[in-house]
Image: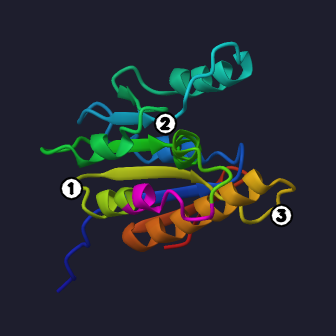
Amino acid sequence: MPSPASPAPRRTLVLGGARSGKSAHAEGLLDDLDGNLPIRYVATARRYPGDDDWEARIDLHRCRRPRSWTTVETGGDGSLIDVLAAPGTHPPTLVDDLGTWLTCELDDAGAWDAPRGAISRRTDALVDTVAGFDGRLLLVSPEVGLGVIPETRAGRLFRDEIGALNSRLAEVCDDVVLVVAGIALTLK
């Protein structure tokens, strides 16, 4: 008698370097659901008036998404955790990305010169919220630990904080994927 199929993973962490294809890969993981269920895209980028390059990057992501998806922008208002923790049934949700979320958290806390772990209450809350999420969840996050050690303290702080956050999220996610040069490698 065949064994019962294991349930579809609920939480997937998609890691990758800059321009690796991690966001497109995560979006593709929802292709089979598009049209059947509403899909929620949680954008974490903060807008910077006058930064045309940043706006172009945001527009590139926006244009790539199907029009049927609902976009929730949380950049800079600290509401990512609230969005994920809201009561009720959650539609399939893609969060893109945790690097911009972490940057906003460090900015808002004025923690760029603080000791490592200064925003641990917020990262703890995010990990707990992801662990308890009751629907399909995809998290996109930068993998920055494969390159050179950043020259600046802020760069080293960001690398250390995102690395620690990614490790903790990998523990509570069902799947972990690393995207390199557009190719997805299953880690878990």
Q: Which residue in the protein does label 2 denote?
A: 44
Q: Are marks 1 and 3 in contact (CB under 8 Å)?
A: no
Tell me which segment is drawn in magenta: 115-124
Say which residue appears at 43% left-offset and 74% top-offset.
171
Say which residue appears at 34% left-offset and 43% top-offset.
93
* Cα gap from disc 2 to disc 3, whole angstroms: 25 Å
Say which residue appears at 53% left-offset and 60% top-offset.
118
Q: Residues within 10 Å of mark 3 (few under 14, many from 20)?
A: few
Q: Nearer the viewer, residue 99 or 7?
A: 99
Q: Is residue 66 visible?
A: yes
Q: Which residue in the protein does label 1 denote?
A: 134
Q: Quadrant of residue 157?
A: bottom right
How far across and how far down the image is residue 114, in percent? 63, 57
Q: Which mark is residue 82?
A: none
How far across and how far down the image is residue 130, in percent? 33, 58
Q: Nearer the viewer, residue 99 or 67?
A: 99
Secondary structure beneath label 1: loop
Secondary structure beneath label 3: loop
Residue 53 appears left or right of 95? right
How far across and how far down the image is residue 28, in percent? 48, 43
Q: Earlier in the sequence, mark 1 or mark 3?
A: 1
Answer whether residue 109 is magenta in the image.
Answer: no
Answer whether residue 119 is magenta in the image.
Answer: yes
* Cα gap from disc 2 to disc 1, whole angstroms: 20 Å
